[in-house]
């Protein structure tokens, strides 16, 4: 049987394309998609929260997914910018810092519905503290210096109440994480502390803190906070797969409910950089971000 040169060439091209496609798929399967998060809770807790989500994402994007812990908030920013990780769970302020540091090359994909109107709480064991004004002359713990809900927004609302933490308080401290702030207040190391309302509600729900002893005396108005961010230059198809995966999570499905509960989310919704303009303005007003 005689094969024409044209058919032979066509057969070779088809075989080449199939080989390239299979090589590409194998390479994609071999590649590790690395995810990190700002260390606003203990490393073991962050790992526990991410495990089922990571397994879910593996199935959706067809790649091995690994959680890569970082030492502090600044390290999460540098890891994403320098391509050490592919996606990061940022707080609103950390996203603003990452976006500024990268000259606008960070894209927030999704946020929890709860992050549209997130809040911070101020807690104390001191019976004489019942308002922000009562903090004058007292000691206060924030979380991390780069935390939106554990420092930036609490500081912003203190300043709005005419209280300068640096001059009107006896001493301020930075615990490094929200759960550590509660521990500092409960242990009498500080008179009061400011933290993320989500972590507070989790600690109360798990009976790790007694709200009759450590109590909330002020809750801030709502603001945009956490999101899952990637580099803007990420492959568009992968970006879409990730976004679709988060948006498809449905708490009515038992397998998804466990993921959502660990993420403390009712659902995930799309987000955009413009949502964080007020966080950027608050950071500038509080002197935490240069104009």
Image (cartoon, helix red, strand yellow):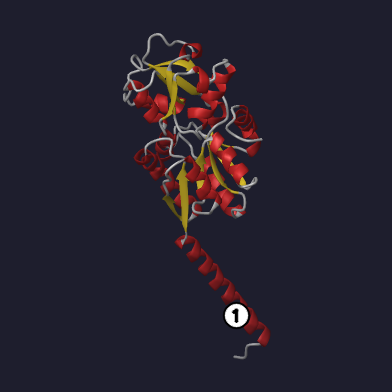
Give percent across and percent down for residue 238: 56, 53
For this orientation, the residue located farthest to the right is 6
Can residue 221 be seen? no
Name the spot of residue 75 as percent of width and height, x first.
48, 45
Is any atom of residue 31 visible in this view?
yes
Of residue 268 and residue 193, the one placed in the foreground of this image is: 193
**Quadrant of the rendering where the N terminus is positioned:** bottom right
Q: Secondary structure at mark 1?
A: helix
Q: Is residue 36 above or below residue 278?
A: below
Give the residue displayed 41% in from the left and 33% down from the top. 177
Residue 192, percent across and down? 41, 19
Residue 291 position by quadrant? top right
Q: Is residue 147 above or below residue 238?
A: above
Number of other residues with Cα within 10 Å of mark 1, as a class: few under 14, some 14 to 19, many 20 or more:
few
- Judge left or right: residue 129 versus residue 104: left
**Total marks placed:** 1
Tell me what residue is drawn at x 50 percent, y 49 percent. 79
Residue visible at 51% across and 17% down in the picture: 168
Relative placement, left or right, of 94 versus 30 is right
Among all residues in the image, which is located at the extreme bottom?
2
Q: Nearer the viewer, residue 33 or 96?
A: 96
Nearest the viewer among 7 and 165 is: 165
In the rendered image, the vertical position of residue 6 relative to residue 213, given as above or below: below
- Left or right of residue 60, residue 106 in this image: right
The spot of residue 11 in percent (x, y) is 60, 79
* Residue for badge 1: 12
Residue found at the far top of this picture: 128
């Amino acid at each position: 049987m005689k094969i024409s040169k044209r058919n032979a060439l066509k057969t070779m091209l088809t075989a080449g394309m199939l080989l390239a496609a299979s090589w590409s798929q194998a390479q994609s399967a071999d590649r590790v998609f690395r995810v990190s998060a700002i260390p606003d809770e203990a490393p073991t807790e962050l790992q526990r929260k991410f495990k089922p989500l990571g397994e879910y994402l593996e199935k959706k994007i067809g790649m091995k997914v690994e959680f890569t812990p970082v030492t502090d908030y600044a390290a999460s920013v540098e890891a994403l910018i320098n391509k050490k990780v592919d996606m990061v769970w940022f707080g609103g302020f950390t996203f603003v810092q990452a976006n500024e540091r990268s000259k606008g090359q960070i894209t927030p994909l999704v946020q929890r519905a709860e992050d549209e109107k997130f809040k911070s709480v101020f807690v104390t064991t001191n019976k004489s503290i019942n308002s922000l004004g009562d903090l004058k002359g007292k000691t206060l713990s924030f979380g991390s210096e780069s935390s939106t809900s554990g420092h930036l927004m609490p500081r912003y609302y203190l300043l709005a109440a005419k209280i300068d933490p640096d001059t009107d308080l006896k001493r301020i401290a930075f615990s490094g994480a929200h759960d550590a702030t509660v521990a500092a207040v409960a242990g009498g190391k500080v008179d009061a502390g400011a933290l993320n309302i989500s972590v507070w509600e989790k600690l109360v729900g798990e009976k790790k803190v007694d709200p009759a002893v450590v109590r909330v005396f002020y809750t801030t108005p709502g603001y945009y906070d956490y999101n899952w961010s990637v580099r803007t230059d990420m492959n568009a198809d992968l970006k879409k797969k990730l976004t679709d995966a988060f948006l498809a999570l449905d708490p009515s499905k038992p397998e998804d409910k466990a993921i959502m509960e660990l993420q403390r989310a009712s659902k995930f919704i799309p987000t955009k950089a413009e949502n964080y303009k007020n966080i950027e303005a608050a950071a500038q007003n509080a002197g935490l971000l240069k104009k």
